[in-house]
Amino acid sequence: MKKLTLLQRAEYDLRHAKLALAHYTGDEFELDIVAYHVQQTIEKLMKWELENVGFQFSFTHEVQILYQEMLDAGLTPPTWILNHYNVINDYATKTRYGESLIAVRSVLDLIMAETSVYLQQQQQLQQQLQQKLQQQSDKTNLTNS
């Protein structure tokens, strides 16, 4: 079994959130499941960015802590995360430990849309990094030939 990166895991979480929302039957609990996966996507994207610049992130679900760590690492985290951190944290903690959350659909849709954009940006960054590494490898190979 191959090891997935945090970016790949974030992609899977968001994919499952979208699938669950596409099959939403009106059961309020289903929205909490979607909210949990959206929160996991955000958390993993933030940790992936930190990891990508060599910063040892905290093992936490608190996005405001990760947000501050991103600032400390010289990164520019999306401001919408800070604006919604209380809701995003509730998605992690209240749904994880069985407390009643009942996500609000309109807020969830907004955060999910922002998360989708964030994921796409990070995937593009990953592609650019891979291309840069490949170019460096190609130059090294030419020099050594």
Image (tube, rainbow, N blue to C red):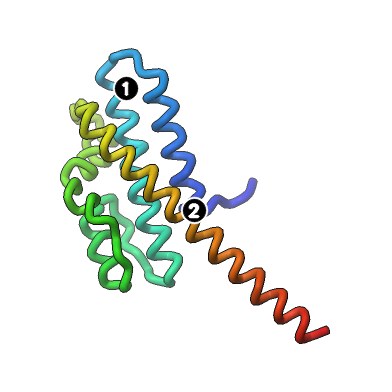
Q: Quadrant of residue 17?
A: top left
Q: Which quadrant does the C terminus fall into?
A: bottom right
Residue 117 x %, y %: 38, 46
Q: Residue at x 21, y 34 (%)?
A: 107
Numbered label attached to residue 64: none
Q: Return the residue found at the far right.
A: 145
Q: Which amino acid does label 1 sit on?
A: Glu
Q: In this view, does 48 lie to the left or right of 78?
A: right
The vertical placement of 23 against 96, above or below, is above
Q: In this view, does 2 lie above or below 35?
A: below
Disc assigned to residue 123: 2
Question: Residue under circle 1?
Answer: 30
- The disc, 2 or 1, on the residue closer to the chain's N-terminal end is 1
Q: What element carries label 2?
A: helix
Is 140 above or below relative to 40? Answer: below
Graded by Cα atoms within 10 Å as few (under 14), some (14 to 19) or many (20 or more), the crowding at tag 2 reads some
Task: Give x and y (percent) for residue 122.
Answer: 44, 55
Residue 97 in which image quadrant: top left
At label 2, the amino acid type is Gln
